[in-house]
């Protein structure tokens, strides 16, 4: 981004004044900035201020920690964490888990019906077997359609 700004400035300056040289123009300002912010004197001032801050922290930190430990021991310290999107995320996660569980149950019901039709042949099978398994399959199909309708209606499908 900085190179783009420099390039645009160089091009605009050359269009307005062909003898304009951006780096020659900006050099005194850059030197002044460098001396103010990056000179050994400026760095020494920042190091000194940081050392004073660290010393003050070293003096006050034990008192703060002692007070904090006292509050913990007396049960006065309470930590409440309330993330902005956590409730919405938990609700969506619960919906996904419920839908997944329902889909697994429906799939297991359909597979179990298929296996039972192959393996299980009681005496009344010829009369009621087809109807019972057909009814079970229609029930599973209806639950699956209901689940798809609920997903479509919620707008998250």
Image: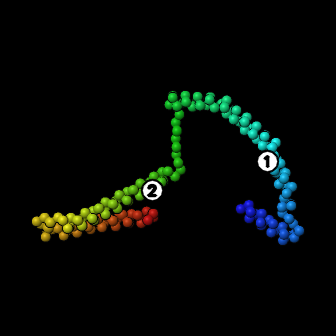
Q: Is residue 135 visible?
A: no
Q: Quadrant of residue 48?
A: top right
Front label number (1 vs 2): 1
The x, y position of residue 41, in whole percent, is: 82, 42
Lateral position of residue 73 relative to residue 121, left or right: right
Q: Quadrant of residue 19?
A: bottom right
Residue at position x 58%, y 28% in the image: 66
Relative depth, front residue between 15 and 128? 15
Relative depth, front residue between 43 and 115? 43
The x, y position of residue 51, in whole percent, is: 72, 36
User: Which comes sooner in the sequence, label 1 or label 2?
Assistant: 1
Q: Against 47, is 90 above or below?
A: below
Secondary structure found at label 1:
loop
Disc 1 from disc 2: Cα separation:
52 Å
The x, y position of residue 87, in whole percent, is: 48, 51
Secondary structure found at label 2:
helix
Relative depth, front residue between 87 and 54? 54
Q: Against 116, is 57 above or below?
A: above
Lateral position of residue 155 relative to residue 32, left or right: left
**Residue at label 1?**
38
């Amino acid at each position: 981004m900085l190179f783009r700004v420099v390039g645009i400035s160089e091009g605009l300056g050359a269009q307005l004044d062909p003898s304009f040289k951006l780096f020659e123009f900006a050099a005194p300002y850059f030197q002044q900035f460098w001396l103010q912010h990056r000179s050994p004197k400026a760095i020494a001032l920042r190091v000194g201020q940081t050392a004073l801050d660290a010393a003050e922290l070293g003096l006050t930190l034990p008192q703060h920690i002692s007070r904090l430990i006292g509050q913990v021991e007396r049960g006065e310290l309470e930590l409440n964490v309330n993330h902005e999107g956590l409730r919405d995320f938990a609700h969506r996660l619960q919906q996904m888990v419920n839908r997944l569980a329902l889909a697994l149950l429906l799939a297991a019901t359909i597979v179990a019906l298929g296996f039972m039709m192959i393996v299980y042949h009681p005496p009344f099978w010829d009369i009621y077997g087809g109807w019972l398994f057909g009814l079970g399959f229609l029930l599973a199909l209806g639950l699956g359609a209901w689940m798809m309708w609920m997903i479509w209606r919620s707008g998250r499908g």
